[in-house]
Amino acid sequence: MIDIKICGLKDIGHLNLLGELGVAYAGLVFFPKSPRYIPAEPAHQLSAHKPPALNLVGLFVNPSDEEIAHILPHVKLDMIQLHGDESPARVRAIRSKFHLPVMKALSLAGEDDLSRVPMFEQVTDWLLFDAKAPENSHIPGGNGRAFDWTLLKNKKFARPWMLSGGLNSRNVTAALDQLRDNPPAAVDVSSGVEVDRGVKDLDKIKEFVSSVRA
């Protein structure tokens, strides 16, 4: 079964719904420029009440050690997601220092972008493939943009990987159908389950989960 990650959670009711639906991962965004940003204290309240089987993923963009260290005493993360321009050396350093699994997001627009994958496979626990952000965007992900999913068709990687980028309940079936011979371990959604930027919707979450499970 393909796992699901819902990113950009802020509300305990939404977190509880993920537990009821058997969603594997919930993303908390610790990037202040994002409309989905959550400060340490509200994030602490969420993590204190999270369903036992739900894994919390903390999303950071080009973070300093101090930024990560500020969050970890408040929030019990199960994984760190790096969604910026972090180098393989930086990914390795974060993984070593904080002793947590790390997922590295890589943005794709064409075949050439896949040339970076092998260097990250050596230093990360998960890969996440997202669409490149528009030039005028101040956030690297969660822009509701899809990329050509066939770039990943029949590709095999040394690490488990998530598919992201503009997914919603209407197109996720088509995406997974194109990748059915070598599917991702999980799919990741943020804007596709929102009624406004940063505002998640219970019905949209249910619809997305149902589409993936179907």
Image: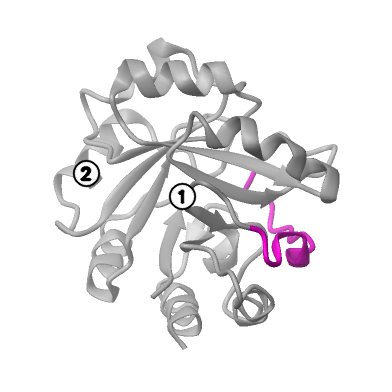
- Horizontal and vertical percent position of residue 85: 66, 26
Q: Name the residue under label 1.
A: 8
Q: Can residue 186 be seen in this view?
A: yes
Q: What element carries label 1?
A: loop
Residue drawn at (64%, 45%) of the image? 141
Q: Residue 206 carries which label?
A: none
- Horizontal and vertical percent position of residue 192: 59, 66
Q: Residue 47 carries which label?
A: 2
> For residue 67, what is the image quadrant?
top left
140 is within the stretch colored magenta: yes
Residue drawn at (29%, 75%) of the image? 21
> For residue 145, what is the image quadrant?
bottom right
Please name whichever residue, 34 or 177, is drawn nearer the observer in this view of the structure: 177
Residue 9 drawn above or below residue 172 = above
Q: In this view, does 149 lie to the left or right of 118?
A: right
Residue 178 drawn above or below residue 67 = below
Q: Is residue 29 left or right of residue 173?
A: left
Q: Distance between the residues labelled 2 and 1?
A: 13 Å
| Residue range of the region highlighted in magenta in the rendering | 139-155
Amino acid type of the residue that numbered disc 2 sits on in the rendered structure: Ser
Mark 1 Cα-neighbour bin, 10 Å: few <14, some 14–19, many ≥20 = many
- Horizontal and vertical percent position of residue 193: 52, 67
Please name whichever residue, 25 or 34, is drawn nearer the observer in this view of the structure: 25
Please name whichever residue, 71 or 194, is drawn nearer the observer in this view of the structure: 71
- Horizontal and vertical percent position of residue 150: 76, 67
Residue 121 drawn above or below residue 182 = above
**Quarter of the picture holding the N terminus:** bottom left
